[in-house]
Amino acid sequence: MPPIQQPLCQKARDRPVLGPPADERRILPRWRYNRAIVAIDLRSDTVTRPTAAMRAAMAAAPVGDDQYGEDPTVNALQDRVASLLGKEAAIFLPSGTMANQVALRTLTRPGDDVLVSRESHAVWHEMGGSAANAGVQFTEIGARGAFDAADVLAARKPRGHVIYPPTTLVEIENTHNRSGGIVVPQDACERVCAVAREHGLASFLDGARLWNAAVASGIGLADLAAPFDLVAVALSKGLGAPGGSLLAGSRATIDLAVRYRRMFGGAMRQAGIYAAAGVHALDHHMARLADDHANARRFAERLAKSPRIALDLATVQTNIVVFGLRDGAPDGAAVVAAARAQGVLLFAFGPRTVRAVTHLDVTRAQCESAAETIAGIVEAA
Ligand SMILES: Cc1ncc(COP(=O)(O)O)c(C=O)c1O
């Protein structure tokens, strides 16, 4: 098979081209939004484009019908991730959100209570899916993305009580997105899961960015996953694949997850095309996550020098930088709009909070330049 060449014109065309949001276009002269500025896109690590080598691996992947368990590339990916995470089995799913939804449905029953970290992805970014799909309620515990065994014991509602919703699951997010990509301390994970087990609660790790946690902490993936009954990992973030997440756990738990994946409409057929991108990403994009972490730190160190930016550098442990806007700085939405006009794309997490994420499609120089742009915007206000 000839190698797949990504045409240069396509690469350029595929890059985000800046302009004001659609509603502003109506009032701006045409030349203002027609300029093709190539963006430094720090909105998320999900914005990466598959490399030419990844596309070639996808095109060459042997495939079959995954619903019959016959896709060799999906099977290889599932086996590989199960083994990396030290679990018996794994299941491939289209997205991290679906992995979380299937995990909740697999480990709980409608009406149950789930203990989660404050500002977890499941609570903020899944459209209320957990209430709709698994029928569970959340109790947020701890602070700054982490919690410990004492928080579990204080918040747990026992089974069999006449009025309490039974707490049946504890969920940890590692790294923790809205807390700035912090790595949750492993000893806390171990204590939380031990106390959960003691009280008959299941444990789930939303490890969409567990790869980053492993690289940043130096703790192996299997050790990070070991305390948990079920673990989710995503291929479409720092690893740069165009999609796909996996859940890993015991054979019996994964068999149940297979059922719920189908019920939720997430079972695919020749999904090896996608899985091949994941295999390629595991082979080629894991070690370089350290570069993203170094770029995030460099970016954050520049921002932290600005008197109008609130940023605790201790939270910058991986590839996410969440910063606050102090008095005198414009609101998050205004900072995002002004940055966009200057070629830097960011995500407003709240009225006074902004997130930036480094990834394999932004260089060290671009991160430094983006930090200068943002500092200029908040200080000029
Ligand atoms: C911690 C965490 N979990 C789950 C997800 C969901 O992943 P997806 O966007 O693939 O649905 C994300 C997405 O950014 C995330 O940050």
Image (cartoon, grey):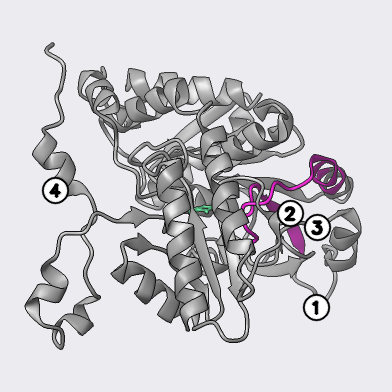
- Between 27 and 258, the residue placed more toward the observer is 27
- Mark 1 neighbour class, 10 Å CA radius: few under 14, some 14 to 19, many 20 or more: few
First in sequence: mark 4 vs mark 1: 4
| Labels 3, 1: front one | 3
- Alpha-carbon span between mark 4 and mark 2: 38 Å
Q: Which one is earlier in the sequence, the residue at label 3 or at label 1?
A: 3
The quadrant holding residue 230 is: top right
If you read the primary sequence from the N terminus, does the residue marked by circle 4 or circle 3 appear first?
Answer: 4
CA distance for labels 1 and 2: 41 Å
- Mark 4 to mark 1 CA distance (whole Å): 58 Å
Q: CA distance from mark 4 to mark 3?
A: 45 Å
Task: Kindly state the secondary structure of the residue where label 4 is placed.
Answer: helix
Residue at point 79% right, 45% down? Answer: 185
- Between the C-alphas of marks 3 and 2, the distance is 17 Å
Name which residue lies at 53% across and 30% down: 90
Amino acid bearing label 2: Ala
Quadrant (top left/top right/bottom left/bottom right) for the N terminus: top left
Cβ atoms at labels 3 and 1 below 8 Å apart: no
Which disc number belongs to residue 163? 1
**Which residue: 22% across, 18% down?**
60
- 10 Å crowding of disc 3: few (<14), some (14-19), many (20+): many
Q: Going by the image, does 55 lie left or right of 354?
A: left
Q: Which residue is mark 2?
A: 314
| Farthest residue, direction top | 1
Callout 2 secondary element: helix
Which numbered marker is on residue 59?
A: none
Q: Secondary structure at mark 1?
A: loop
| Residue pointed to by mark 3 | 147
Residue 219, by quadrant, is top right
Numbered disc in front, either 4 or 1: 4
